[in-house]
Image (cartoon, helix red, strand yellow):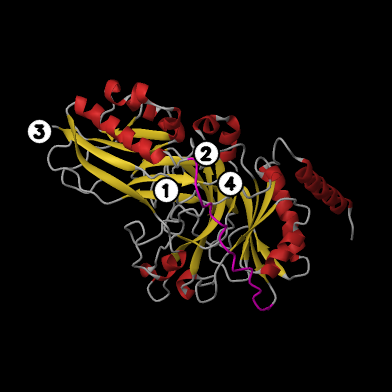
Amino acid sequence: MFTLFTMMTAVYVIFLFALVLTTNAQCVSDADLAHIAAAGKRALEANERYTAATQSELGGLPFDFRFAPANYSGSGVNPSSRYVVPRIGPWLEGDLGGDSFLNWGVGEVSPLTSREALVVLMCTPPPLRLWTLEVAILYRMNKTNPLAFQSPGASISNTVNSATLGPAAKTNEPLLVIVTADRNTEADVKKAFKNITNVATIVINGTADLLHFGTHPLKEGCDIFQLCMRVHASPAQAKASAFAAYLGRRFPLLLVKPSFAAADAPLYPIADRAMRVGPTTEVGLTARRAVLRDAVVKRMQSAQLELRTTVAFSPVELDKRRCLLDPEYRPYGTGNCFGTSSDGRYTLSHPYTLPAGNLSSLVLVVIGANHAATGNAADNQLLHDTKVSVNPEGMEGSAQFYLGPAATPADAGLFAFAFTESCADQTLLGRFCAVVDQPKGGAAGALLRLEAYLDNESGTRPSLGLVHPLALVFTASA
């Protein structure tokens, strides 16, 4: 029976869809997104072809897609980024969660069969350096020994980011995100949300012999999929009220399950986007990096600091299939692939040993190219282990500081940044210094990384042909 309440509900849903289609300056509220998600759920379940769960079966806690705590620094996390992941139930800043969550949304929304889908109704962020959406296999469970699970952290999907999504959807716009391996499920979800203009399909890109689909991780030994959104803000953007408000948003998430038997209709394989090749604007910086190195050494020698070790860096090219199949594969010197972004270029220091003795005088200076300043990346950070990170703004002017009157305009694309126990000597180090814990002599040196994200020309990770850093290790002269 068509009641007044039904009519009012229908009118309200039409209003919400109209709002979605006409919003420009500000995206719709979480409450309005929840109403739209509920309407899509009803459309999916209308002919009893699908169920679309919005809460867990245990305890009735809601699914949503929201920010992980800012204070997490493990698993290769970049402390300059913020991460948005699926979550069940309450999650407060500082929470680490129990064994069921492990801080990364491992719960009932993460295991999938080959025909299921995770569906997120969200808003794209306010203006930022970049954002990117991708799916990785976070864990491969072992049904005979649940404690013997693997943690490959391997990307297993295409990526959607602020460069590849249309200009109208880059900021403050509603976006329907569909995570699935099946083209029929994707088509039916799109039909249920047909009034949503911006749609991004994250294709779980693999085959039955590569992926372990299932719904009961410990019983079936299936894969745990992690939908992750990385958000990179400049210091100024991070201070904006719009970004602060975005950090608190909770976007509705549905777990869509077909209720009818059918054969798989795979969306995959999805080919990787072609990475940019050929020359970049950094072609002439290799020679200038050598000049900068000499200037840094001269400056340190003037303070009775002697160069002890020079540490090279190399970019890491992941073999994603091997990440999943070979538990002995150690691309970062560890047994997993760390969930690294396909839109990122990770350049890591080679293993090195610190000088023996008291290292209270140790100064470690990394020199290289600021790929954001040269226009070859939307963002990059220099990291000392996982807790200290330097943004592009922190690198700017550092090469000129060391080169002085000998600096050229091209040197604005270089940096020289120090890590030491004390940054008090402004004459020696200027403002281009970060404090780190005093290391132990004779021990292995810290892992140093330059992470660069998003070549805006190709929409991929930055080119392999960029200028890579090197580190100079100084201690007091004998």
Amino acid type, residue under disc 1 in the picture: Val
Magenta: main secondary structure equals: loop
Mark 4 Cα-neighbour bin, 10 Å: few <14, some 14–19, many ≥20? few
- Which region shows up in magenta? 261-281
Q: Secondary structure at mark 4?
A: loop
Residue 216 is inside the magenta segment:
no
Q: Secondary structure at mark 3?
A: loop
At 36% from the left and 21% from the top, the residue drawn is: 405
Q: Earlier in the sequence, mark 3 or mark 4?
A: 4
Which residue appears at 45% of the width and 28% of the height? 409
Q: Earlier in the sequence, mark 3 or mark 1?
A: 1
The answer to whether residue 302 is left or right of residue 396 is left
**Quadrant of the rendered structure where residue 284 is?**
top left
Amino acid bearing label 2: Gly
* Residue 299 x, y percent position in the rendering: 25, 27
23 up-or-down from 410: above or below: below
**Residue 160 drawn at (x, y percent):** 60, 53
Kindly state the secondary structure of the residue where label 2 is placed: loop
Identify the mark nearer the N-term, 2 or 4.
2
Please state which of the two labelled residues, at mark 2 or mark 1, is closer to the viewer.
2
Task: State the separation of the CA atoms marked 3 and 1.
Answer: 38 Å
Q: Amino acid at mark 3?
A: Ala
Element type where label 1 sits in the image:
loop
Mark number displayed over residue 478 = 3
On the image, numbered disc 2 is attached to which residue? 375
Q: Which residue is mark 1?
A: 77
Q: Is residue 372 left or right of residue 120?
A: left
* Placement of 69 over or under 218, stated as above or below: above
